[in-house]
Amino acid sequence: MLWILLALIFLGLLGYVLGRQRAVASASGDVRELHSLPNYYGLNVTLLTLVPALLVLGLWLIVQPIIVERTVAGQIPASFMEQVENPTLLMTEVRRLAGGIETAIERGFLNVEDAANLASDTDIRAQLAEAGVALGADVSTEVLAAAQDFRAMNATGATWMLIVVFALAFAGLAYSYVRTHKDLRARNRVEYAILSILMIASTLAILTTVGIVLSMLWDTRNFFQLYPWQDFFFGLEWRPSFEGGSELGLIPLLWGTLYISLIALLVAVPIGLFAAIYMAEYATKRVRSVAKPLIEVLAGIPTIVYGLFALITVGPMLRDYFAQPLGLGDSSSSVMTAGIVMGIMLIPFVSSLSDDIINSVPQTLRDGSYGLGATQSETVKQVILPAALPGIVGAVLLAASRAIGETMIVVLGAGAAARLDLNPFEAMTTVTVKIVGQLTGDTDFSSPEALVAFALGLTLFVITLGLNIFALYIVRKYREQYD
Amino acid sequence: MEDGNVNDMSGIDQGVAVTGTKMKARGVDVFYGDNHAIKEVDVDIADKTVTAFIGPSGCGKSTFLRVLNRMNDTIDICRVEGDVTLEGEDIYDPKVDPVQLRAKVGMVFQKPNPFPKSIFDNVAYGPRIHGLSRNKSDLEEIVEKSLRRAALWDEVKDRLNAPGTGLSGGQQQRLCIARAVATSPEVLLMDEPCSALDPIATAQVEELIDELRSRFSVVIVTHSMQQAARVSQKTAFFHLGNLVEFDDTDTIFTNPSDPRTESYITGRIG
Ligand SMILES: Nc1ncnc2c1ncn2[C@@H]1O[C@H](COP(=O)(O)OP(=O)(O)OP(=O)(O)O)[C@@H](O)[C@H]1O
Ligand SMILES: [Mg+2]
């Protein structure tokens, strides 16, 4: 692999030098005669040499394993398939065996002919173990045949890949070299190539998002085939059991998520916003230069540390001083604990975003207000906050998205018990915690208990997407009104 | 406004009897850090009079204007020395609340700066914070009167709830004037109020200034010699932070005593 890349890069460099020389030569040495700077001619050749070859190389590396695996799997006799307990594991076995044989050849324990003539009645397992490759089970004839097919196809594929890639590289080099001439618009071509590269990058980013959603959609669909959607969306109970008969109702989890997020926002928004107002409008330069970084340190603390703080300090304190005296329960993990600690985590988020937004309100507006005899707080309340409102709403909704997606603080602060309750001193849990819960340990991806994680994930995705769209809507609405 | 006498300096009523001194500045120095922006300036702002500040760009007109209502307090590096009094009271006395002072000495800025609120709320801002109206209809009356005086009423009376920031630049400036007038200050400071206005709106604002003179003192900064001559009774000429000459507008424009004043007015410096 590495040497292919090195060879391609060498060809690219060669193309650069050749292209440049040819361009300069075609203008009989007078650079002013050229349409573009000499570098552009060189780059043009390099790009035509490298880009198509690299694209095909990348594509080939993705597509070949898929095709090979499909074909090999199709060639395994159906009668044999029926005997196997777990068909999905069969291909893994084939791949392992094929890989093992390759390793053995590489390390010199097998020569190529022996490898081709391996028969299932010899003890392949022992032979490979000698070469340092451990196989899980004895090798059956069918698996061996499949593994040999697999190897053969991969080898042919690799050869063809080499041929095609280098043919393309040479073709690109030759074509662009021949076309190089002093009147060629090399500068425009390079510009166009750069544009395409940028576009490919942004397309990839978008495609990844789409891919994530699609993969979740797929598994969610599988889940809803096993479990009725009404029971998921409207179920009031969350009681998964791997023996079957689970109840997988979303409502208690959603309730926990929203309840905890609400408390977190009730803590974070006022404190963060007031801190931002103080920093932006009242604090002297000295105070600001010390206090602002201190607040922002909060943002750098990993959430697991907040979780510990919730578990060890806040939880027991709330229980001893509030929940027990008020007779509201005696659990140290509670919605309140997680909400408060998550609120603390979000303070720097809200405050530093709001601070930037408040600072960007033009000074002339403040002057106008002071010039009419308004006090500082009147100015903040009636002029600055309204002007900064769209941005602040955006900041709050962003904080809400984070609260909804937070996991660690909830596990340690609120526990993992799904419950539908109004009492904020009870343990509850959230969607994210349950996603983790359903996927840790031994999971069988064909059971609704595991697949529900995807439905939960998709639900979260839709909720945060909705929040973001709402934020955009608010921001746009006020924009129109104010500038 | 009949435009017949807009460009005619002799048509202005300049013989108004001065009714006493409203504000008095003595030995005022202003520093921005090390930059000595205003040097030992003495000025009297007479009551019910329009005083014009003229001078080349950067000479300190805006700075001195801001001394008069302590707007310089909002600039960290700015330091003011000397005595400034409003009706005999030192406005830089620690006992004086700058907020109260600014309600009495209002200001219109060089650049229009309407609040991101409706036109109505913009004008009602001052009356609301100072409690100038007893009820809603009172407030509506104040808003209407102020907008009329700023020659904006006819253009906005059907859209008082539209945002003030949606107006044109000249309309915004008149909105800011209406906003300042609505607070009923005793002294109104205007920093180049017409720099964003077309000739018609300029004429309207000049008419307004003339009308305001019957009730307030007005101080106006302007780069237009004609405007200074048309609307003011007193003119102060600043140059490089110094007050070069301060006298009746007639005298300044017809018979200046300092050669720098004469060269500026006739267009040789600045
Ligand atoms: N906020 C400030 N910080 C520092 N220096 C300032 C500030 N405002 C004004 N200055 C300086 O003070 C001097 C006077 O400025 P000022 O704004 O008063 O001039 P001006 O006469 O109003 O000019 P213009 O006609 O262009 O508005 C200038 O040298 C300027 O650089
Ligand atoms: Mg100025």
Image (cartoon, coloured by chain):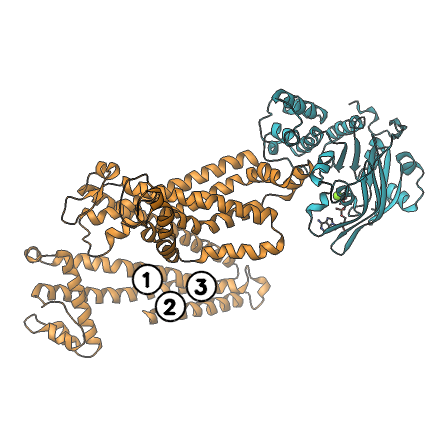
- For ligand 2, the image quadrant comes to top right
Q: Nearer the viewer, residue A79 or B180?
A: B180
**Mark 2, other Cα within 10 Å: few <14 / some 14–19 / many ≥20:** many
Q: Is residue A20 left or right of residue B73?
A: left
- Residue highlighted by disc 2: A8
Q: Residue A106: name its quadrant.
A: bottom left
Q: Which mark is residue A57?
A: 1
Give the percent coordinates (x, y) of residue A165.
32, 64
Three-letter amino acid code at disc 2?
Leu
The orange one among the chains is: A
In what element is the residue under mark 2?
helix
The structure residue drawn at horizontal position 27% and vertical position 43%, both measured from the top left corner, is A419
Q: Is circle 3 on the same chain as circle 2?
A: yes
Give the percent coordinates (x, y) of residue B11.
88, 26
The structure residue drawn at horizontal position 33% and vertical position 66%, both measured from the top left corner, is A166
**Label 2 or label 1, whichever comes before in sequence order:** 2
On screen, B33 above or below A384? below
- Confirm or deny contact between disc 3 and disc 2 (CB under 8 A): no
Quadrant containing the C terminus of chain A in the rendered view: top right
Q: CA distance from mark 3 to mark 2?
A: 13 Å
The residue marked by circle 3 belongs to what chain?
Answer: A
- Confirm or deny contact between disc 2 and disc 1 (CB under 8 A): yes
Q: Is residue B100 left or right of residue A336?
A: right
The residue marked by circle 2 belongs to what chain?
Answer: A
The cyan one among the chains is: B
